[in-house]
Image (cartoon, helix red, strand yellow):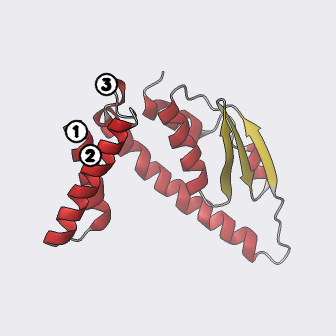
Amino acid sequence: MRLSLVAALYLFWLVLSGMFTPFLLAAGLGAAVGVAALARRMEAAGQDRHPLHLTLAAAAYWPWLVKEIAKSGWQVSRVILDPRLPISPSLARFRPSQTSTLGLVIHANSITLTPGTVTVEADRGEFLVHALTREAAAGLAHSEMDRRVTRLEGTP
């Protein structure tokens, strides 16, 4: 079991929990050890998937993603509250520029976290995304999110 994976998962637990009672500290550590053991058993935590290589890149990506989630939430609210209700649901299929499974997963989940869009399918390096408006669907391919996730995964 990789100690760095346990440490990264435990740190993530602590940041999200915000509570530091002995029981929760022990439960968080137990969960981190359990997930790391399961990842090892599934061979998902191999030598090339060391989580610490993402630390600096993720530190730049997360604030940007939070800002995009807030902006998108505001836009979705405006669309819903508009008396004309300019909703134009659309499906968009595009090929993201990520090459690793981790990069594809981060990108698909980032799309889904952003209000008004849901990654419906991620298959063979291609995404199918449902968007609330045609404009949102049109902006998915070759987007800033695509570029940032590619930079996060460490691909030029």
Which amino acid does the dot numbered 1 rest on? Ser
Sequence-wise, which precedes: disc 2 or disc 3? 2
Q: Secondary structure at mark 2?
A: helix
Q: Position of residue 132 (x, y in %)?
A: 75, 59
Residue visible at 54% across and 62% down in the picture: 70
Q: CA distance from mark 2 to mark 1?
A: 6 Å
Q: CA distance from mark 1 to mark 3?
A: 12 Å
Report which residue position mark 3 lands on.
47
Q: Which quadrant holds residue 94?
A: top right
Asked if the residues shown at circle 2 and circle 1 are in contact, with their CB atoms under 8 angstroms apart, the answer is yes
Sequence-wise, which precedes: disc 1 or disc 3? 1
Residue visible at 22% across and 38% down in the picture: 4
Q: Secondary structure at mark 3?
A: helix
Q: Position of residue 87 (x, y in %)?
A: 81, 64
As drawn, 95 above or below 137? above
Q: Which quadrant holds residue 147?
A: top right
- Few, some or many residues within 10 Å of mark 2 (<14, 14–19, 20+): some
- Which numbered dot is residue 8? 2
As drawn, 64 above or below 22? above
Q: Can see residue 20?
A: no
Placement of the N terminus among the 4 image quadrants: top left
Q: Nearer the viewer, residue 144 or 19?
A: 19
**Which residue is the extreme one toward the front?**
41
Q: Can see residue 4?
A: yes
Report which residue position mark 1 lands on.
4
